[in-house]
Amino acid sequence: MAGEAQADNARRRPEPDLGQVAVVPGAPRCLVMGVVNVTPDSFSDGGNWLDPDAATGHGLDLIRDGADIVDVGGESTRPGAQRVPIEGELSRVLPVVTALAAAGCYVSIDTMRAEVARQALRAGARMINDVSGGRADPEMARVVATAGVPYIMTHWRGHSADMYGPATYDDVVAEVRAELAERVAAAMDSGVHPGQIVVDPGLGFAKLADHNWTLLAALDRIGCLPGHDRRFPVLVAASRKRFLGRLLAAPDGELRPFLGSDDATIAVTALAAAAGAWCVRVHAAAGNVDAVRVAQRWREASAEAVR
């Protein structure tokens, strides 16, 4: 009964005034977000784009390959990663955000820190991608509310130093939806408009391989959160993650290398887009852009077939 009461209260919560809020961007098809990791230790491309000029060039290449958004991050969230000082994160991301925004790119800042988000927005970022869903920094929601920008909230149970310790679920889909619902409600209580919010099931974040597959199979339910009367856009971030390498392992059990799972990523992209995902976050754009175009045409043909 307590859960039902909380859900009723959430439904009755007045939505903040839309005002000057920039709602989540849309397109006729699933969007593609290209990853720009300005880090030495990200799981698949750490060090490749640590130089600001190299990172900027990579972001421009992603846009040329068809990406709609570039997501710039200066802190690795690979399993076991330790946090970097805020000064280091800022020095990594701000030159890249500034350059990409000046070139006309739609830039997202991938950070768990409110101050990094604030400064990146001043530098030209137009979206915040917070893999902690606001849990790592309670000031983040206020930054989002004040700036009025789209906000990606990921399901997350703790920092990467202990990535898999909290990966225990009785019903992973129900628990992820419930925990996302709580985070969304907390953001709205801080003044974030629901039209700003995107949710991400957090593949790999406190999830084992089977959890990831179960969440992908239930993708059409992820955006429908208990206690909320709207369907939130869903971001899927499966690119090059370990559960793909495990699926594609060699007969001797050796995992497929990260760079060897791009074709599998494209397959997930097509399926996620066909299932109605708002956006996919990927390391390589071109094949994934093709995949979302195919998926959109498939969806259109399916709709036509039932008329």
Image (cartoon, rainbow, N blue to C red):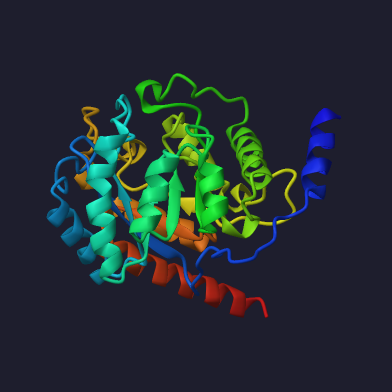
Q: Residue at x 27, y 51 (%)?
A: 94
Which of 34 and 89 lies nearest the eye of the viewer?
89
Of the 4 image quadrants, the one containing the C terminus is bottom right
Q: Residue at x 28, y 30 (%)?
A: 84
Q: What is the x, y in percent for residue 298?
A: 49, 71
| Residue 198 seen by the camera | no
Disc count in the image?
0
| Residue 222 seen by the camera | yes
Of the 4 image quadrants, the one containing the N terminus is top right
Q: Is residue 95 left or right of residue 270?
A: left
Above or below: residue 286 compared with residue 206: below
Q: Is residue 287 left or right of residue 222?
A: left
Q: Is residue 177 left or right of residue 92?
A: right
Q: Is residue 5 left or right of residue 104?
A: right
Q: What is the x, y in percent for residue 164?
A: 42, 23
Q: What is the x, y in percent for residue 280?
A: 41, 56
Among the 4 quarters of the image, the one containing residue 65 = bottom left
Q: What is the x, y in percent for residue 184?
A: 63, 44
Above or below: residue 297 compared with residue 226: below
Which of 277 and 2 lies nearest the eye of the viewer?
2
Which of 212 and 303 lies nearest the eye of the viewer?
212
